[in-house]
Amino acid sequence: MKHLIIAAIMICCAPALHAQSEWIAPEGFTVNYRTLTWDDFKGKEDKEHAAALAARNLQAEAYVSPAIYFKADSGKVENGRVKFHFHIKCAFQSRAFVRKPSNEEHSYYVQIHEQDHYDIALIYAHLLQDLLSSRDYSQDKYQEEIDKISNDLIAKYDQTQKTYDGEVNPEGRDDVQKQTLWDKRIKKCLENYTDRFISSAEEAIQNVAVPGTVVKRLPGEPTLQFVVRARPLYTEFTTELKSKIMETSEWSENPGIIAFYNQRYYVGDEGATPKDCYRTLAYIFMPTADNYYKRILIDSFSNDGKQVKLGKVFFANADSDQTKELVIMATATEPGGTMYYNRVYDNVLKPMPGQLRRIPEAKTKIESGFEGTKNGKQCHSKFRSEDDVAEALKKEWHN
């Protein structure tokens, strides 16, 4: 029996039009610096909600409960109009629930569905910020005007959440094609701070699923928040990956951003139990115009379907031109020892590609290798540290 995946949406919007030190409704925590994990779903199933579903022969596998809060600092009056500085918070509520074994093996689609619900809330939180902050208000009717803007947007938000669940899970039947289409719609909207792709046809959003997508960054947006929001489709950004974000002006006057994402996938013969596999995707965001970046795939790292451990990321000269190349090092634990991966990538050219070109080991002289015992023989890897690689490149290219 297939079960309904449902999202309970709570909207709390309470404007405070005088300076305040705390939120009106501060329950919940912000999750825009990483993607959701099942550890976030700590609530208990709502009995009334469960009974209503049971009456229809359905049950919820999981649900989220994002809440949009906003407040305003004291307004500044000029020529009879008042301007406020608004603060928006999209919080992940503690009532979020998951039923076991939904948070166990082969339930990734459920997690994606719930992440989409939270991302819809983020989309409309961003839109609310723009709508409220981009205008001034009547000195005597500002409350009515703010209420009108927020209520209209919340109505659109609520309808979007209902439409999403209605199309993807009609009467408890999972529609895989609809889920995939909505995944792309939501991702496209999140990347561009808009809701105009919510009803877009498949052909209008095809570029979401391929490398090289152009994404928008708001002025002053923190790098971490941008990297998480602009993540590729069906990838995860964990707390551990925060330390691997790298801003660099090596290839452009305005800094580019290197970031890594984890991705889960399945392999297996038809009819057999799928095998869980993981890979790490490396991307570089290169500035193309004011507030826009091209998301370029660098490479995919995996060790027979298992995740690798990222090592040093740095620039060094690895060919005959004067521009430095990108070097990424990684390791993977294998029986008997450690596999060392050392990969070198050519600099970004114009027009910008969808994926960087990896320079063959034969040209860089920088090899990957195994350190340990394999087939009864002791093996040694020549390049196990940044110093090993940098020194070899220095000798080869005299930089």
Image: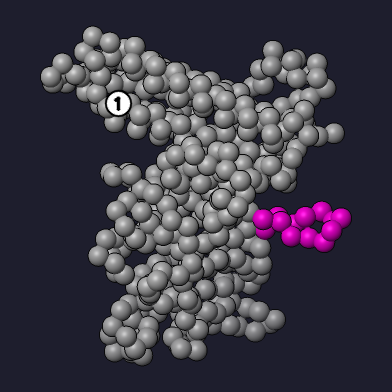
Q: What's under tag 1, amino acid-wise? A: Phe
Q: Is residue 59 left or right of residue 42?
A: right
Residue shown at 60% from the left, 65% from the top: 302
- Please tell me whether mark 1 sits on a helix, a strand or a loop: strand
Q: Is residue 366 left or right of residue 236?
A: left
Q: Position of residue 344 (x, y in %)?
A: 44, 77
Q: Position of residue 307 (x, y in %)?
A: 59, 60
Q: Answer whether residue 94 is visible to the viewer in this image.
A: no
| Residue that extends furthest to the left in the rendered view of this protein | 79
Q: Position of residue 223 (x, y in %)?
A: 35, 49
Answer above or below: position of 90 versus 107: above
User: Which residue is nearer to you in this view: 202 or 193?
Assistant: 202
User: Which residue is nearer to you in this view: 207 or 68?
Assistant: 207
Residue shown at 29% from the left, 53% from the top: 290
Answer above or below: position of 282 versus 135: below
Give the extent of the magenta segment. 265-277
Q: Is residue 331 left or right of residue 163?
A: left
- Few, some or many residues within 10 Å of mark 1 (<14, 14–19, 20+): some
Mark 1 sits on what residue? 86
User: Which residue is nearer to you in this view: 3 or 349?
Assistant: 349
Residue shown at 67% from the left, 55% from the top: 265
